[in-house]
Amino acid sequence: ADGTVEIPVVFNVIYNKTTENISDSRIAEQIEVLNADFGATNSDVSQIPAAFKPSASGDIKVRFKLVATNRKKSTKTNWRSDLNEMKKASTGGIDPTDANKNMNIWVVNSILDQYGRSGVLGYAYYPENAGLWYDGIVIANQYIGKTGTPSPFNLGRTTTHEVGHYLNLPHLWGSSDAGCLTDYSDDTPVSPGPNYGAPSYPLSRACGGVSSSQMFMNYMDYVDDRAMFMFSLNQKTRMQAVVSASGPRAGLR
Ligand code: ARG
Ligand code: ZN
Ligand code: CA
């Protein structure tokens, strides 16, 4: 009635070692993190700088509900992001559960990039890929939930970030490493590229010779989990549009 959309979530856990077969409670914890972050009930909203409070999203009015968890043992010890083999039973993975109706999350032991380099925490597809066989989100098992997760990616916010992509949010610096590109949200200051660690506020960076105070505490930057705690109002509008009745992910509602 208040326009909140509850997205059904399917977890597909593919493991080699049993420690990679993350527990149901870790998965429940991750759902709780998503609901807190998207509801803006996360305790660290209080840390949003005063200058950014007027553009803070508040409740995104999107929630998440676990509907199934599928598990599969595999001999594979890493997975390349460009191949998406974890998403097909025929290549050792798990087929998605109706990707038009569910947000599928694959949990794997290790993700490599297209050049075979390690260190990828997660990746996701934009709504233009809605319902395709590879649509959804992939996260390395260590970063799901909070209990037992390694600092500084220990608060479940890798998944919050990837759900942002899944709901049409680019990085703050735009969809290319070049930076200083639009992220289609006027209330997130233009950014030349990622911030890492836990920067101290305020932080000015320039694009085209013009400096602006960076919203590095936004979930769509690359800072540590404890240093990210907000979406903006315009980002809320973009995500709402995706799950609206006429949006590309209307099947989730
Ligand atoms: N590097 C990943 C991406 O580009 C995720 C970054 C997650 N950051 C975090 N603090 N958990 O999608
Ligand atoms: Zn990202
Ligand atoms: Ca912007």
Image: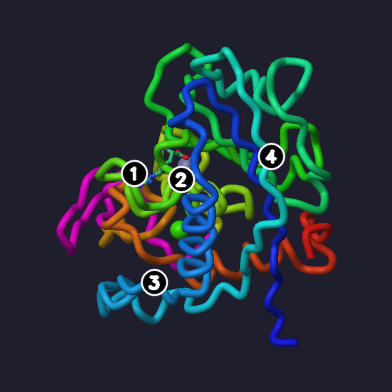
Task: Name the front one of labels 1 and 4.
Answer: 4
Q: Measuring from the top left, give residue 214's x and y in whole percent.
A: 29, 58
Are dots 3 and 4 in contact, CB under 8 Å?
no
Q: Which residues are magenta?
A: 185-211
Distance of label 1 from label 4 (alpha carbons): 21 Å
Q: Measuring from the top left, give residue 122's x and y in whole percent.
A: 49, 36
Residue under label 2: 144
**Quick one: label 3 or label 2, which is nearer the N terminus?**
3
Q: Is residue 195 left or right of residue 55?
A: left
Residue under label 1: 149
Q: Residue furthest front?
A: 18
Residue at (71%, 71%) from the top-left corner? 5
Q: Measuring from the top left, give residue 161's x and y in whole percent.
A: 47, 50
Question: What amino acid is labelled 2 in the image?
Answer: Ile
Question: What amino acid is labelled 3 in the image?
Answer: Asn
Q: Which quadrant of the picture is home to ligand 1?
A: top left
Are dots 1 and 4 in contact, CB under 8 Å?
no
Are dots 3 and 2 in contact, CB under 8 Å?
no
Q: Which mark is residue 42?
A: 3
Question: What amino acid is labelled 4 in the image?
Answer: Asn
Q: Which mark is residue 134?
A: none
